[in-house]
Image (tube, coloured by chain):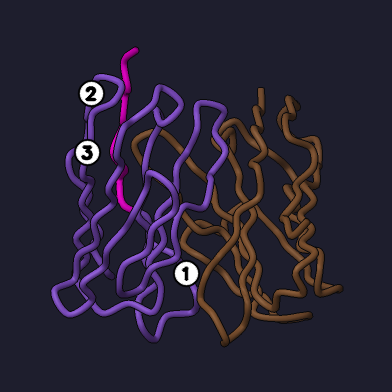
Chain colours: A purple, B brown
Amino acid sequence: GIQVEQSPPDLILQEGANSTLRCNFSDSVNNLQWFHQNPWGQLINLFYIPSGTKQNGRLSATTVATERYSLLYISSSQTTDSGVYFCAVEPSGSARQLTFGSGTQLTVLP
Amino acid sequence: EAQVTQNPRYLITVTGKKLTVTCSQNMNHEYMSWYRQDPGLGLRQIYYSMNVEVTDKGDVPEGYKVSRKEKRNFPLILESPSPNQTSLYFCASGRGTTSYEQYFGPGTRLTVT
């Protein structure tokens, strides 16, 4: 099956810093989504981005489908950004199953 | 508001006592799915449904049942829960073909003692 690798596994930042999270995947995909899992366990949709670039406030994402990677940028980080960030992909030709990466645990210190 | 809802959000039960976790979406999505999340194992798909009366197994279907009698609802049934089904469960939904984006419910924390 498709492999999804996220890096770094852990990231500690001071409030106000910027960061880049990476997601590599091993095959072509119909769907790529970024999620934030908050401390209460909820999965929050950040971006649906199978290709191209999107921005939403302090967050932006870029997927280069031909090179099989996606980047999530967080600018001016806040303590509320803490949590786990997941990349999830749906391989082309699959039955809509999302394969999740192992996540990046982000801690933003005040 | 477009959303996926799950109930209950938290449940503690005992081994062997049948339970149902409900999932409902108000976006008229054809596709619905259940995942479980466990430490060190990530999120794994249990069952999915491409449309009403169409369901299929995911990666970890053992010990679970589902049904899809209506488009908006996709309940997860544990006929005889066991402690290894203690987990965080997520329901998700998505459109059939026009977009592949999936939307997740808030999660259900299940503890089986």
Marks 2 and 3, how far apart at CA: 10 Å
**Closer mark to the observer between disc 2 and disc 1:** 2
Image quadrant in which the C terminus of chain B is located: top right
**Vertically, is B62 above or below B96?**
above
Circle 1: residue type: Gln
- Furthest-right residue in this view: B70
Q: Which badge, 1 or 3, comes first in the chain's sequence?
A: 3
- Quarter of image, res B99: bottom right
Residue A108 is a magenta residue:
yes
Q: Which residue is mark 3?
A: A19
Residue denoted by label 2: A12
Percent across and percent down for residue B106 are: 65, 43
Of A87 and A4, nearer the camera is A87
Name the mark nearer the viewer: 1 or 3: 3
What span is in magenta?
A101-110
Q: Residue at x 75, y 27 (%)?
A: B13
x, y (%) of residue A46?
A: 46, 52
Helix, strand or loop under label 3: strand
What element does badge 2 sit on? strand
Amino acid found under the numbered disc labelled 3? Ser
Q: CA distance from mark 2 to mark 1?
A: 31 Å
Residue drawn at x 61%, y 64% is B33
Task: Indicate which disc residue A97 carries.
Answer: 1
